[in-house]
Image (spheres, rainbow, N blue to C red):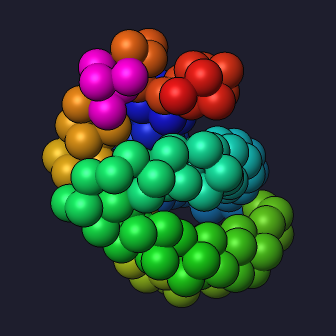
Amino acid sequence: MRAQADAANAMLDRIAIGIDAYRGDVSAYPLSLELSRLAGVLRIHFSLGERNLYPFMMASGQPQTAQVARGFQREICQLTLRLDRFSQRWSNSRAIASDMAQFRCEAEAIISVIRERLQRETRELFPLADALADRFNIVPGFDDRRAVAAG
């Protein structure tokens, strides 16, 4: 999950740079491609949390760990829905080019929300997951689905 979070952060950076460097219709296509990549990486990232990490943490027998995992899990539906709406609305370069000011406004807002979420995962969620991985002798990072299933 860390690798996906790192990739998503890099994509967010490229989108922000692309918005700042926007020079007309020709700049919209690379933005639409990067947005598509971002949505794909985040869908995988969120799905791994939903299917593997959060259930593992909630079943850990550690109340604080379970509570943190439940909190992250509760947020995921709303964030996924928001990302899907944004991605659908701005799914092609024509949509972006036709209303760049609105795209910029909405993109800055969703970038901020996603960055905050990824930062909180790094600060709050991953250290608890690492502690569980150590406890159960699982490969840290939860990048391998087999490692989570083995716990």
Q: Nearer the viewer, residue 117 or 99?
A: 117
| Count of numbered labels shown in the rendering | 0
Q: Residue at x 18, y 46 (%)?
A: 123
Q: Which of 101 and 75 lies nearest the eye of the viewer?
A: 75
Which residue ends up furthest to the front in the rendered image? 61
Magenta stretch: dominant secondary structure:
helix
The residue sitting at 70% across, 73% down in the picture is: 84
Vertical side of 95 occupied by 9: above or below:
above
Is residue 86 in sight in this rendering?
no
Q: Is residue 141 magenta?
A: no
Q: Quadrant of residue 127?
A: top left
Report the span colored magenta: 132-136
Residue 13 position in % (x across, y down): 39, 43
x, y percent for residue 151: 53, 28
Which residue sits at x=50%, y=46%?
56
Instruction: Pick the residue in front: 93 or 150.
Output: 150
**In this view, 103 is above or below 36:** below
Residue 97 drawn at (x, y percent):
70, 70
Q: Position of residue 78 (x, y in %)?
A: 55, 82
Q: Residue at x 34, y 52 (%)?
A: 61
